[in-house]
Image (spheres, rainbow, N blue to C red):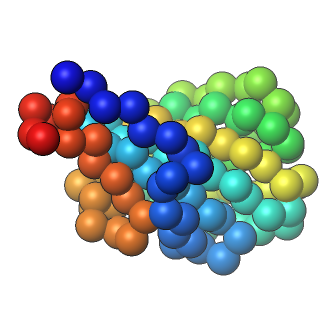
Amino acid sequence: MTIPLNISDLSVFEPIEGFRGKLVHTDLMTIAHWEIDKDHSLPEHSHPHEQILNLIEGEFELTLDGTPHHLKTGDVLVIPGDVPHAGRSITNCRIIDVWHPCREDYKNLDGSKLNPSIKGQA
């Protein structure tokens, strides 16, 4: 049985100044709902996970493997695993990120949530 989660019930964590997120994990993926303040930067990094960035609201510049992409509301960008990327918010933004496989490194952060019904646990 699946138990719905409401995003408003999840705790917020702020791994980088100006980036506030709420996480949901399954065995196979992690989803983050971000609220990002204007003029904040995401340092260049890479990870083995495939990532899909969904820009729900605002403008965000993401540099993927040295190529800048100016993203606006409604844009989606696929980030392959192990590809360096960095970003900065041009305006206040709302972003939904999806990673596969699950971000094990995020599971123990304050604010993360594992939907127990997905794993078959009560």
Give whichever of 64, 89 is nearer the camera. Answer: 89
> Which quarter shows the C terminus?
top left
Taking the view exactly as shown, the residue that stands out farthest to the bottom is 17
Q: Residue at x 43, y 64 (%)?
A: 111
Determine the image quadrant of residue 81: top left
Q: Position of residue 11 (x, y in %)?
A: 49, 63
Q: Residue furthest left?
A: 121
Q: Is residue 93 left or right of residue 45?
A: right
Q: Nearer the viewer, residue 121 or 94?
A: 121
Task: Classify residue 5 as left or right of residue 27.
Answer: right
From this view, report whether residue 68 is shown above or below residue 79.
Answer: below
Q: Is residue 22 visible?
A: yes
In this orientation, which residue lies closer to the viewer: 108 or 17?
Answer: 108
Residue 99 location (% of width, % of height): 39, 38
Q: In this view of the protein, can residue 49 be seen by the observer?
A: no
> Which quadrant holds the N terminus?
top left
Q: Residue at x 74, y 34 (%)?
A: 56
Picture mark count: 0
For this orientation, the residue located farthest to the right is 91
Left or right: residue 91 versus residue 8 is right
Q: Quadrant of residue 58?
A: top right
Where residue 38 appears, as percent x and y from the top left, is: 86, 62
- Taking the spot 39% from the left edge, 45% from the top edge, the residue there is 24
Residue that appears at 21% across and 31% down: 118
Locate residue 109: give its quadrant.
bottom left
Residue 98 in the image, given as x and y percentages of width and height: 46, 36
